Image (spheres, rainbow, N blue to C red):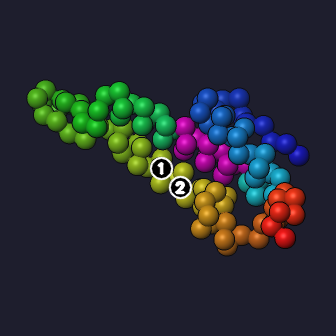
Amino acid sequence: MTFNPPSWLAQEAKELWTSIAPILEADGRLTEQDVPAFIALCVAYSTMISAAKELAEEGVTAIGWGGEAHNSSKKHPAAQVFRDSEKTFTSLCDRFGLNPKARRGMALPQPADDAGGLLD
């Protein structure tokens, strides 16, 4: 079964989905029961990217934001959004085995020997 991204996902989330969902489906890490968590992973990724872009454009500090005095400087609100979404994204990556440490604990199919006997 091929899982398609929901139409309402942000562009970055859809791009992530289309790049890794087929790999996860092929080795059994993405099943129908996993789709809600995978949606959350993709949303966390797009939120993280959006916050990173905002920080890159506006800087990591905000002047007079949130009712503060106009000359005061404080951490940009997007910094917390980035941190929260990165934490969620990283946690869900672990769940789907999207890093070497997480994959070590998973029973995954072995990749095919595509070295053509060169290593024999």
> Where residue 39 sits: x, y (%)?
66, 44
In what element is the residue under mark 1? helix
Please name the residue that numbered disc 2 is placed on: 90
As displayed, is residue 18 above or below residue 7?
Answer: below
**Which of the 4 image quadrants contains residue 62?**
top left
> Where residue 89 sits: x, y (%)?
54, 51
**Which of the 4 image quadrants contains residue 58?**
top left
Please name the residue that numbered disc 1 is placed on: 86
Q: Residue at x 42, y 36 (%)?
A: 51
Q: Residue at x 36, y 38 (%)?
A: 78
Q: Amino acid at mark 2?
A: Thr
Characterize the local packing of mark 1: few (<14), some (14-19) or many (20 or more) Cα atoms within 10 angstroms.
Answer: some
Q: Residue at x 72, y 34 (%)?
A: 6
Q: Is residue 42 magenta?
A: yes
Q: Are marks 2 and 1 in contact (CB under 8 Å)?
A: yes
Q: Quadrant of the C terminus?
A: bottom right
Q: In screen coordinates, is 75 left or right of 109?
A: left
Q: Amino acid at mark 1?
A: Glu
Is most of the magenta stretch helix, strand or loop?
helix
What segment is highlighted magenta in the picture?
35-46
Residue 34 visible, this angle: yes
Residue 112 visible, this angle: no
In what element is the residue under mark 2? helix
Q: CA distance from mark 2 to mark 1?
A: 6 Å
- Is 37 in front, or is 112? 112
> Where residue 114 sits: x, y (%)?
84, 57
> Where residue 31 sits: x, y (%)?
80, 54
Characterize the local packing of mark 2: few (<14), some (14-19) or many (20 or more) Cα atoms within 10 angstroms.
Answer: some
Q: Residue at x 42, y 31 (%)?
A: 53
